[in-house]
Amino acid sequence: MTSRLDVTTADGVVRGRRLGDLLTWRGIPFAAAPVGPLRLRAPQPVEPWTGVRDATEFGAAAPQPRMGTALRPGKYQPISEDCLTLNVVAPATASTKPRPVMVFVHGGAFVIGTTAMGLYRGDRLVRRGDIVYVSVNYRLGALGFLDFREFSTADRPFDANLGLRDQVAALEWVQRNIAAFGGDPGNVTVFGESAGGTSVTTLMATPTAQGLFARAIAESAAPVLVNEAQRARESARQFLDLLGADRGEASRALDLATPAELGRAARRLSAKTLADTPGLHPFGPVVDGDFLPTAPLQAFTDGTAHPMPMIIGTNAREGALFPRLMDGLPTDAARIDAMFALTDPDARERILAAYPGYPAPAAAIALGGDLTFWKPSIDIADAHSAHAATYSYRFDYAPRLMHWLGLGATHALEMIAVFGYGDSAVGRALTAPGGRSGLRAVTDRMQENWIAFARNGVPEPWWPRYDAQHRRTLIFDAPARVERDPGRDRRLAWADYRGYVGEGAADRESDR
């Protein structure tokens, strides 16, 4: 690759800019704007353009609450339904061979997030790893993750799994175009955190994603965000009611509603779902029998998930962040009791006994985090390790300030290390009372493993493969260490828990 900033893609020429030792291209459309008759439809090809398209600014964020687009105090990314863009970062130096590609899918519970966030820009990872980095916007909330197919008409059809389809369309764009940016389309690693991690494990169960990437990294995946069909249908019906729409005129209402009106109904639906079925979320991929034929957990168990190398893991105190900032987990006794009553009452006492001090807040928060993130990640690791190389981790490191705040190694904290963000203003603030050297060491360990995995399909040699017999897990801390079966007592307590899974669970919900 040369230092030229004009790159010819399959759709036209894009012009990026040089930032020091990096080349960047921002806001490149990978699908047509999903507006007008394309609202709530599968992504369609971009209309090719003539001339040179400016690619120096980030595209708009998907419609969402304003808080999700915060870039810094007082600065927010603009939002628009015309949001299907991606960004590319590559080293400015030439390479004699194509570079590994890392494609990042952002988190945010499938309702918030934007690739314009400073944390997600990928510059430090590109510099360290000599890789090509791609970050992807996709549709969120009601426009991306509700299933309105029941209300399709001959004149106005609707599709399901729109945000997931957007991610597949972005990966198809990578296959067609990344070589022009110096990347190797045969060596693509998809990685993501939270809803992004859930996207990764879901893409591994999505047939049309076969062959679009070679390896996967799932950070804090939450498969509970994937909805079975009946539950998704009920969420769509409730959404229309909250929108104030006549179900018989659903297509007209969905076409005419503004993003703000859709957003207000979405927030009401989230609150209702959490109150009625603690632990569930209305927005997420749906097992539609077509694009996503099987629930990801089932696909991993059956061995039908794409048999590629995978890194998967969670943070030590996943749940601690949610009561403070993002109410959405069953992290208090009332919600936890309601959850067990709706799912598996017989498991309640056995599981609660594994959390000493319950119903104290710390124990309840730990339970909610384990239920949502840790337990399903262990289930996936167990299943996938029988079919492909699997590497399990737990992120334990937290600087002193995070302990003082009562958060510890909470949800998303590992992203500071993965993206080398410790020397940013945010990183310096987190480590001001102490912990900078520890964060630097953890950052080194995580980045060298993520990059080695992206380059060769295996992390560093001292990280052993995971299997369901030994359960060797890398603990990212200062220093790092390998443990066998960490959290064994909790794992055994959860082993036979029957959560909100399958049509039976949906039937129990509808009978209430």
Image (cartoon, grey):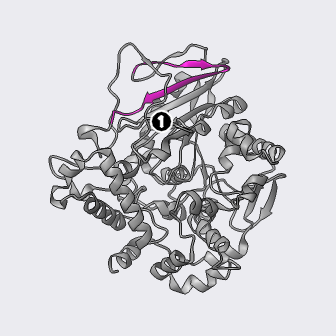
Residue 16 belongs to magenta span: yes
In this rendering, the count of numbered labels is 1
Residue at 61%, 14% (x, y): give it: 3
* Residue 434 in the image, given as x and y percentages of width and height: 82, 48
* Amino acid at circle 1: Gln
* Residue 100 in the image, given as x and y percentages of width and height: 63, 33
* Residue 161 in the image, given as x and y percentages of width and height: 37, 51
* Residue 189 in the image, given as x and y percentages of width and height: 59, 41
Alpha-carbon neighbours of circle 1 within 10 Å: few (<14), some, or many (≥20)?
many
Task: Kindly identify which residue carries mark 1.
Answer: 77
Q: Left or right: where does residue 190 sit relative to residue 280?
A: right
Furthest toward the front, the residue is: 74
* Near-viewer residue (494 or 246): 246
* Near-viewer residue (269 or 168): 269
Q: Quadrant of residue 293?
A: bottom left
Q: Is residue 84 above or below residue 458?
A: above
Q: Is residue 240 above or below residue 78?
A: below
Residue 62 belongs to magenta span: no
Residue at 41%, 61% (x, y): give it: 270
Label 1 secondary element = loop
The secondary structure that dominates the magenta segment is strand
* Quarter of the figure that contains the C terminus: bottom left
Visible in this render: residue 451?
no
Magenta residue span: 12-33
Residue at 61%, 39% (x, y): give it: 119
* Near-viewer residue (432 or 385): 432
Q: Quadrant of residue 28?
A: top left
